[in-house]
Amino acid sequence: QVQLVESGGGSEQSGGSLRLSCAASRFTNCMGWFRQAPGKEREGVAAILRSDAFTRYADSVKGRFTISQDNAKNTLYLQMNSLKAEDTAMYYCAAGANCQRYSLLARIWYNYWGQGTQVTVSS
């Protein structure tokens, strides 16, 4: 079992920044951030491989969001800059074991999920 606890969400103006954190009981092979807006499917935002810190990003956040991991603290981060109204969603931390390198954003690989943290961006 892996416990995941997200923090750092909140309200921010368009163009602002937020940093999300995910405290994990342990890291798995891949860790990721997903988000779900009302009435929409949950989508992968960013993911990272523990072994070599290989990362993948959704096209909608490339150049604005950065995922990182602190192995000593078992904490995953998502730095979100240049926020847009369309970034408004519940953000979830996820952990998976049998991940495929070039499809890290696929939900199928993730077995453990946090409770989520709300991010609201006003324009």
Image: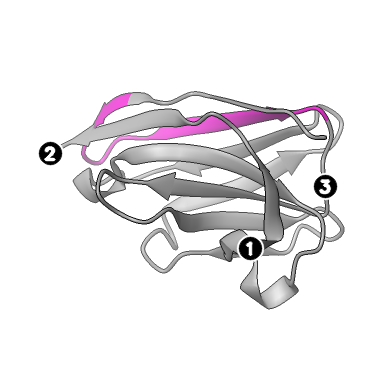
Q: Position of residue 85 (x, y in %)?
A: 20, 44
Q: Which mark is residue 108?
A: 1
Q: CA distance from mark 3 to mark 2?
A: 36 Å
Q: Secondary structure at mark 1?
A: helix
Q: Which mark is residue 49?
A: none
Magenta highlight range: 11-25
Q: Position of residue 106 (x, y in %)?
A: 58, 66
> How crowded is the residue under tag 3: few (<14 C-alpha within 10 Å), some, or many (20+)?
many
Q: Secondary structure at mark 2?
A: loop
Taking 64 as reference, is 102 above or below it? below
> How crowded is the residue under tag 2: few (<14 C-alpha within 10 Å), some, or many (20+)?
few
Q: CA distance from mark 1 to mark 2?
A: 33 Å
Q: Position of residue 48 (x, y in %)?
A: 69, 56
Q: Which residue is mark 3?
A: 28
| Mark 1 or mark 2: whose residue is earlier in sequence | 1
Taking 3 as reference, is 110 above or below it? below
Q: CA distance from mark 1 to mark 3?
A: 15 Å
User: On the rendered structure, is 109 left or right of 71?
Assistant: left
Task: Nearest to the eye among marks 1 and 3: give it.
Answer: 1
Quarter location, residue 2? top right
Q: Which residue is mark 2?
A: 123
Queried whether the magenta region covers residue 14, the answer comes back as: yes
Task: Nearest to the eye among marks 3 and 2: give it.
Answer: 3
Quarter location, residue 89? top left
Label pair 1/2, CB-CB below 8 angstroms = no
| Magenta-colored segment: predominant secondary structure | strand
Q: Position of residue 35 (x, y in %)?
A: 43, 47
- Residue nearer the viewer, 40 or 11: 40
